[in-house]
Image (cartoon, rainbow, N blue to C red):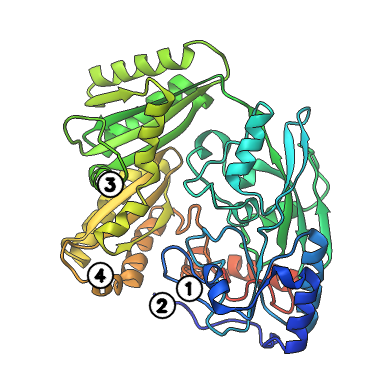
Amino acid sequence: MSEPANSTSPALQPPSEETLTALAHIVGESHVLRDPEDMAPYLTEWRDRYQGRAALVLKPGSTDEVAAVLKCANEARTAIVPQGGNTGLVGAQIPDESGGQVVLSLERLTHVRDVDLASNTMTVEAGLTLAAAREMADSVGRLFPLSLASEGSCQIGGVLSTNAGGVAVLAYGNARSLALGLEVVLADGSVWHGLTSLRKDNTGYDLRDLFIGAEGTLGIITAAVLRLFPRPAERVTAMAALSSLENAMEFLTRMRDAAGPMLTAFEILPRIGVEFAVKHGNDLRNPFEAPHVWYVLFEISCPLAGDTAGDLVESQLAEAIEAGLIDDAVLAKSLTQARELWRLREVMSEVQKYEGGSIKHDVSVPIARVPEFIARANQLVELMIPGARPVPFGHLGDGNIHYNVSQPAGMDKDVYLSNWEALNAAVHEIVLDLGGSISAEHGIGRMKRALLPHAKGEVAMDLMRSIKAQFDPNGILNPSKLL
C-alpha cells in the first residue's frame, strides 16, 4: 500500500526569511544549521528509505527555547519536525521533501536534573541518550532497564515519543511503563509541567500517556521522570537450540513458571539469522557445533547474591533437554560470554543489509499464536516472492516479532524492494486476523500511516484526529506523521 497524499494542514505556510531569522535568533546562530551538507545527517534515516529537505535545523538548549521556537512557529504556521537521536525506523523523525519544514533537534538537552533514590526515580532531559541514562542509574546503584541496540544514539525523548520496547519488556514493560512524569512543550509554546514522581495520582485524565507514543504530533517532550529499579545482584544468560517454535513456546512457559519476574528476556533467533550474524558480524561465532532450526536467548536476573539464578537456569535446561524440548544449550560463564551471545541478537537487523534488500515488519500477535503467525507468513512469502528468505526474530516473551524478509539470492535489489508495500499489506492482514498489531514498538511515522485506519477502525481514528486538532489546531507538529 502506498503512502497517502500529504495531509499537511492548509494553514501551514512556507517559512519566510523573517520567520527563519526569528527562529535562529531564539537558539543562537551557533546552534543553527543552514548548509545542506551540515543538515544532511538530520534529513535521512539509517535505512535510507526516507530522505527529506529542511529550511533549518535548530538545536535549542533549554525548555524555554523549545517553547519560544514553537510559539514563533505556531504564529507563522511553520511546520516543526522534532528529532532525537534519529534512530527511528518508520520515518517519523524525517522532514518531507518540500524543504519548508524545520527540524528541531533535542540533542543539547542532556542534563540529569535530579536523582531521588528514596523514590527510585531520576529526572532527565529529552536529549540524554539511553546509554547515558542507563550509566547514570548504574552509577547510583540502580537499574534503568530499557535496553535497545541503538541505545548509544537514541535519546530519551525519542524513546518515549515512540514508546520503545526492547528486550526487557517481559519483566519491566515498555517505555510507557518506565516514565512517571513528563515536561512537554505544546504547539502554542505553553509548557505542561507534569514532572511528578507520584506512583498514585487519580486526578482526572492521564495526560502523560497521550504524549508517550504520539511521535511528536501532540507536543514535544523536553524532560521525564524515569523509574529506577534495584540493580540485579546476579544475572545469567543462556542460549538454547530447538527444533521447532512450538518447543520454544513450551520452554517459555516452563521458564516463566520457574523464574517468574526474574525472567527478564526471552528472544527467538532463526538459523538463517544466526548464520547472517556469524557471516557478517565482527568476530561472532555460533556457540553450537551443529546448526539448529531455532535458538532461544534468555536472561534471568536475581536481586539476591549467590547462585540462585545460575542453579535455576541449569536445572531448567537439564529438564528441558530430558523432556525433548531443547536439543542443546550454552550457559554463559562470564560477562564476556554473555555479551558474545547478546551480540548475535543485537546485530541481527544490521547484518541483513549485506544480503541485499530486506522488507521489514515490526508486529505483535498474542504470544500463543506466534508459531502460527510465522508459519502462515512464511507460506505467504514463498507464494508471493519464491526464494525470498524470511528472518523472523525478536521478543517471543511479549509476542513482538520482527518479521524481516531478505531478498532471494541473486535477485536485483530494487526489483525486490518494489514488493515492499504489497508484502507489508499481506503480512499485516495475517497479523490482524490473529488479533495482533501492525506496529509493536517502532511506531507509525510515515511508513505505516496509510495502514493505520484499516488497523484501528473509524471510531479510533476519529478520536485520534480530534485529540490532534485540540492539541495542535494549526497542524505544525510533525505533519503527515502517524495521522
Q: Which residue is mark 1?
A: 450
Rendered location of residue 472, percent (x, y): 73, 72
Examine the rendered structure and indicate whether residue 272 appears above or below residue 23.
above
Residue 282 found in image quarter:
top left
Please give left or right for residue 203 compared with residue 237 in the image. right
Quote the CA–CA distance across marks 2 and 1. Answer: 7 Å
Quote the CA–CA distance across marks 2 and 4. Answer: 19 Å
Q: Which residue is mark 2?
A: 2
Quote the CA–CA distance across marks 3 and 1. Answer: 30 Å
- Mark 2 vs mark 3, foreground winner is 3
Identify the residue shown where x is 79% and y is 80%.
Answer: 22
Q: Which residue is mark 3?
A: 273
Identify the residue shown where x is 57% and y is 73%.
Answer: 39
Count all numbered tags in the image, as a single digit. Answer: 4
Identify which amino acid the numbered label 3 is placed on: Gly
Q: Which is more N-terminal, label 3 or label 4?
A: 3
Looking at the rendered structure, the secondary structure element under dot 4 is helix
Q: Which is more N-terminal, label 1 or label 2?
A: 2
Q: Are marks 2 and 1 in contact (CB under 8 Å)?
A: yes
- Mark 1 vs mark 4, foreground winner is 4
Residue 303 found in image quarter:
top right
Residue 217 found in image quarter:
bottom right
Looking at the rendered structure, the secondary structure element under dot 2 is loop
Looking at the rendered structure, the secondary structure element under dot 3 is helix
Q: Which residue is mark 4?
A: 413
Examine the rendered structure and indicate whether residue 113 appears above or below residue 20.
above
Identify which amino acid the numbered label 4 is placed on: Lys
Quote the CA–CA distance across marks 1 and 4. Answer: 24 Å
